[in-house]
């Protein structure tokens, strides 16, 4: 699969630029959402004070870690479901003794 196969997320000819934009913006937005809802308890004044003292790199790193954990959990879930489907297929083809 190539990046150009997905015209919605990666317009033809601009794949690398959009990949860079997504790599920077998605973890940063995730970090901002985490800081707003979890750390500041949805209180705008606390969030703004965190945002003044916090740096871009710290917020990006928090979001990156959250997205990495979500990706790992999806990989584990898919591996377990694949393993279960293979084992159920093996049970269908076994002859009773």
Image: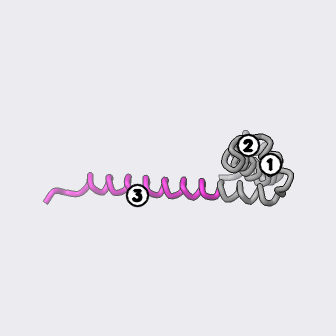
Picture coordinates of residue 27, whole percent (x, y): 73, 52
Q: Quadrant of residue 42?
A: top right
Q: Between 30 and 80, which is closer to the camera in this rendering?
A: 30
Mark 3 lies on residue: 83
The structure residue drawn at horizontal position 72% and vertical position 49%, both measured from the top left corner, is 35
Q: Are marks 2 and 3 in contact (CB under 8 Å)?
A: no
Q: Residue sitting at 47 percent across and 57 percent down?
A: 79
Q: Please say whether residue 38 is visible from this viewpoint.
A: yes
- CB-based contact (under 8 Å), mark 1 and mark 2: yes
Question: Does the segment drawn in magenta span residue 85?
Answer: yes
Give the quadrant of the C terminus. bottom left
The range drawn in magenta is 68-97
Residue at 16 percent of width and 56 percent of height: 96
Q: Earlier in the sequence, mark 2 or mark 3?
A: 2
**Residue corresponding to mark 1:** 18
Alpha carbon separation for disc pair 1 and 2: 8 Å
């Amino acid at each position: 699969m190539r990046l150009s196969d997905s015209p919605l997320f990666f317009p033809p000819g601009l794949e690398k630029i959009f990949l860079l934009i997504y790599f920077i913006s998605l973890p940063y937005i995730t970090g901002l959402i985490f800081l707003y809802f979890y750390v500041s308890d949805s209180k705008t004044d606390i969030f703004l004070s965190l945002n003044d003292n916090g740096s871009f790199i710290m917020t990006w790193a928090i979001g990156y870690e959250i997205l990495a954990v979500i990706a790992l959990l999806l990989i584990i879930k898919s591996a377990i479901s694949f393993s279960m489907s293979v084992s159920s297929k093996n049970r269908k083809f076994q002859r009773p003794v």
